[in-house]
Amino acid sequence: MKDYTIRKATREDVPALFRLIKELALFEKAPREVENSEEQLRKDGFGSDPLFGAYVAEIDGKVVGAAFYYWRYSTWKGKRLYLEDLIVEEDHRRKGIGNALFNQMIRVAQENDCNGMSLQVLEWNEPAINFYKRQFMTLDPEWVNAHMTRQQVESWRFDEEA
């Protein structure tokens, strides 16, 4: 018998969402990488033009898990749901909460006529890799991730002759 509920996140969930984000960063050995804030989460996810959506898993009124998503557009595939993070507190893993949040993301993709779902997983995170394999996700070793930091973007020197 499940003792949790899955629901759409609200503005009131922001402190719990931010707590889960920091917990994930600690698990991923990168706590200093979190530059986001509760204020930014409120603005970006619960303002007039939200950049992301989230669902939470709740037990006895306490948020114990969350799934963050946004829309991605592939020139080859079209509209896709991008699962940014799926987080379940360590004490509440192996209770079906991750599966329930994942299933909710599939529902959101179906309801929004997405042509698929994408995500990333760290190559050393065997529990997550195994979880996504059980969900029949295709893990693609060919693609290399690339990013720029805020500092790199802000200090960019435009080559006017290009």
Image: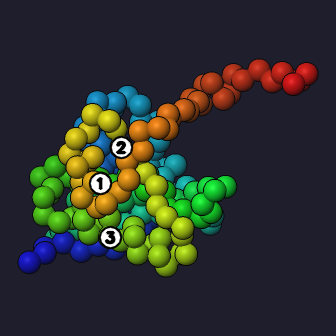
The dot on residue 121 is 2
Q: CA distance from mark 2 to mark 3?
A: 18 Å
The crowding category of the residue bearing disc 2, from other C-alpha atoms within 10 Å (few below 14, some 14 to 19, many at least 20), is few
Q: Are marks 1 and 2 in contact (CB under 8 Å)?
A: yes
Q: Secondary structure at mark 1?
A: helix
Location of residue 77 by image quarter: bottom right
Q: Which residue is mark 1?
A: 132
The percent coordinates of residue 109 (x first, y second) are: 47, 70
Q: Secondary structure at mark 3?
A: helix
- Quadrant, the C terminus: top right
Q: In the image, which disc is placed on residue 102?
A: none
Q: Return the x and y of residue 138 as percentages of the image width and height.
A: 38, 53
Instruction: Give whichever of 138, 21 is nearer the camera.
Output: 138
Type of amino acid at the residue the image marks with label 3 = Asn
Q: Nearer the viewer, mark 1 or mark 3?
A: 1
Per the model, the C-alpha gap separating discs 1 and 2 is: 9 Å
Viewer-proximal residue, 143 or 122? 143
Look at 17% across and 66% down and name the residue there.
96
| Quadrant hosting residue 147 | top right
